[in-house]
Image (cartoon, rainbow, N blue to C red):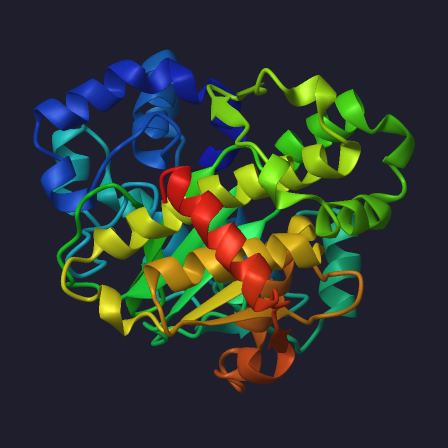
Amino acid sequence: GQLMMPALSWQCNAASKQVQQLRQMGAEESVGRVEERFILPKLMWALSQAPTMRKSVAQVMTTGDWIATMLTGKARLSTSDALSNGLLLQQNKKLAESVMRDAKLNPAWFPAVIQSGRAVGKVSPKAFDGGEKTWATLQERLKGCQVVSGLGDNHATGVGCGLEEDDFQTVVISAGTSGTINRVCRAQVPLAGNAACFEYYKNRLLLMMLADCCKWYDRFVARDAAKYANRLGDLNDLAAKANLTKVRRVLHRGGKEKYPPSWDKMTLGERVASTQLSIRLELLLLVRAMLEETPGTEKAVTRFVLTGGLSQSPFFQQVFQAGARILVPKAKVVISARKGRLRYQTAAYGALLNAMRPEQPHAATKLCPTATASRADAETRKALTYLLESFGL
């Protein structure tokens, strides 16, 4: 039968032994960094737990590829997820057959590789006949629709933020549950080695992450401003009116906050401003690291795009504007102006844009509008610049 490895994700930590084996055999020189959650070591682990399964495995693929197979009858391995799971050679995106053989895996288990964003085929009721009414109903409903090879989640998030595959001038900062910093670079550009790397169609997506972002802010609201939980706009107003001479940095280490000694004597507005500025500072420090990730090319960055729930705060935007000008003096800072239910669901939105790609490869230009970020007056900008520089930016 077909084996979908993401279904084993809950066991990914158990694959540490297999990761060590792959590293010892030099696999990372071909497929890139290998981690426990990747399909390659998970498959090795699964077969070590049930050796007899080898005789019954027909194909191995990701969940998205399996769904495409069930709808179209064509089995393909999409490059975005496969490259991020140790299954393809980083240099040319071909199946890592020699690595698989060394790991005692059969390369024939894997379908033909297809570039993400390309058409797999059209939905057909004849694609799968397993006697399951659900599939038959879905196939009939989608009959004639084109299925496009899917994306990994980070790739999809970048697409959903409006990043074009050849846009090397833009950095996207998403202040959501987790804070993420993304940019696109050419596949062969030398890197410093601190960013996570993913496919971005023919190029490469770089990712740095602040594990806590809105989560950090939610903890602050629950601790200091519980009655404003459903009135976050009012907190943003308080931050905008805060006395910046009283603002302090909130330290954030190991997923926990350390508040300054004067915290309880500060007004609520000063605490809101301190928290928002501190979160933005951590994101700006990651932006600085991202610019240093591609030595010699940081001058190419001319534009920053803010998205995510916290980015709606005008004070948050003003802090970033000041910080961005420290890092890239002439940079343009804009904010996502997308509306609707998928406003912050960037991965889902990216999947939709990817589905449009065969016929509208540049749909993101029209469907991911931006607006100019809030700008502080000259005096406020000077104060924010001083605070950010004194806090380490």
Question: x%, y% of residue 6?
Answer: 49, 35
- Name the residue at 50% across, 25% down: 252
Residue 348: percent from the left, percent from the top? 64, 58
Compared to residue 171, the image places residue 363 above or below, namely below
Vertical placement of residue 148 versus 50, above or below: below
The part of the image, by quadrant, that contains residue 260 is top right
Toward the viewer: 60 or 292?
Answer: 292
Above or below, 21 relative to 123: above
Residue visible at 66% across and 21% down?
Answer: 263
Q: Residue at x 72, y 62 (%)?
A: 343
Specify whether residue 122 is in view: no
Q: Is residue 305 left or right of residue 373?
A: left
Q: 204 or 256, which is in the foreground?
A: 256
Q: Quadrant of residue 231?
A: top right
Q: How many marks?
A: 0
Quadrant of the rendering where the C terminus is positioned:
top left
Percent coordinates x, y for residue 93 in the rendering: 23, 58
Where residue 145 sits: x, y (%)? 65, 76
What residue is at 58 percent from the left and 72 percent from the top?
Answer: 353
Residue 295 seen in the current view: yes
Q: Nearer the viewer, residue 120 or 299?
A: 299
Q: On the picture, is 349 further left or further right than 325?
A: right
